[in-house]
Amino acid sequence: MLEVKGLTVSYGGIQAVKGVSFDVRKGELVCLIGCNGAGKTTTLKALAGLLPFEAHQLSFQPNNLDNESRLNLITQPAHERLPSGIALVPEGRGVFKRMSIEENLELGAYHQSNKALMKEDMEKIYATFPRLKERRLQNAGTLSGGEQQMLAIGRALMGRPSLLLLDEPSMGLAPIMVEKIFEVIQAVSKSGTTILLVEQNAHIALQIADRGYVMDSGMIEFEGKAASLLIDPRVREAYLGDESAMDVNESA
C-alpha cells in the first residue's frame, strides 16, 4: 500500500531522516520504534505532507484504487492526503480545544459530502468511545488526556482512511487508558484499516504489530516480523528494557 524509498528530511543543515526505505502492505499493522530523536515523528509528518522532504519514491495505493494504480505523494500537498486515504493522529492529540467533540469529529470528515454516511460513521465512533458520546457537546479542551486521544483517533477515522498514521498514542496516559487505546488500535486493524504506528513503548508496539522497523539516528537499523524483533537480543537490549514492561495480552 505504501512504498517509501530514500526518504530524507532536513532541518536546516541537519538531516533528521537519512534516506530511509520501508513499506507497509495492505491490512498490516506496522510499527516504527526507536529512541527519542530517532526521526520517527519526522517520518510520519513527512508522509502526511506536513514537512518538506526528498525521496526517490513515495507511492501510495488507497483501497479505492486497483492494483495497477498508485498515487505519487512526492508532489501531493498535505490537504489532499486525507481525501486520498491517509489520516494522521499527531503526537500530542492536536484536538481543537475550543470546539465541541462533535465539531472535532465533523472536521475529520470535511471532505465527505454524504451527510448520511458521515452520521453513520459518527455513531460508529460513539459506539467505540462511549465517553465521547456522553460528552459530545462538551469542548474538547475540557477532556482528560485519554479522552482527547480517543477523540483524535475518532476524528481520523471519520475520514475513512485506507492508511492510518498513529504518532505516540500512549504518550502521557495512565496504564489503564493505554490498555484501552491499544485495544481500539487492534480493533481498527482487525476491521481492515492499514496502520503505521510510531510508539515510544516498543514492547507494547511489537506485541500488537505484524512487522516492525527500528530507527536510530535517522536510519533504519533493524526490520522484520514483530514477533522476531521482540525476542532479538540486540533490540531487547537497546529498546525494550527489562521484563517488567507492560504486556498487552496479559493486561487485557
Image (tube, rainbow, N blue to C red):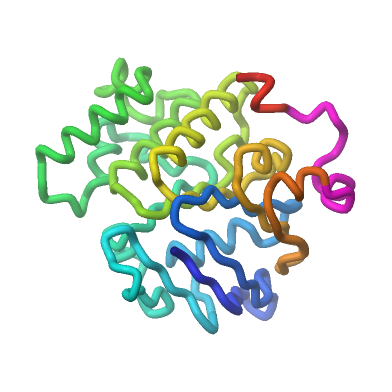
Image point (21%, 50%), residue name: 110
Q: Residue at 62% of width from left, 72% of height from top?
A: 21
Quadrant of the rendering where the C terminus is positioned: top right
Return the residue found at the far bottom.
Answer: 56
Q: Would residue 168 be visible to someone looking at this image? A: yes
Q: Position of residue 77 (x, y in %)?
A: 35, 71
Q: Is residue 116 above or below residue 71?
A: above
Where residue 50 appears, x then y in whole percent? 45, 64
**Farthest-out residue, front:** 67
Tell me where residue 165 appears, x and y as whole percent: 48, 52
Q: Is residue 197 above or below residue 248?
A: below
The quarter in which the N terminus is drawn is bottom left
Seen in the picture, residue 145 relative to 35 is either above or below; the reply is: above
Q: Quadrant of residue 98?
A: top left
Residue 242 covered by magenta stretch: yes
Spot occupied by residue 23 in the image (x, y as percentages of width and height): 55, 65
Image quadrant in which you'd find residue 223:
bottom right
The magenta segment is 232-246
Residue 194 drawn in magenta: no
Q: Relative to residue 226, is residue 4 drawn left or right?
A: left
Q: Is residue 57 left or right of residue 152?
A: right
Q: Is residue 16 above or below residue 99?
A: below
Residue drawn where x is 40% and y is 30% of the image: 141
Q: In terms of image quadrants, where is residue 54? A: bottom right
Residue 145 in view: no
Residue at the image point whose x is 84% and y is 49% from the top: 232
Q: Nearer the viewer, residue 214 or 170?
A: 214
Counting labels gives 0
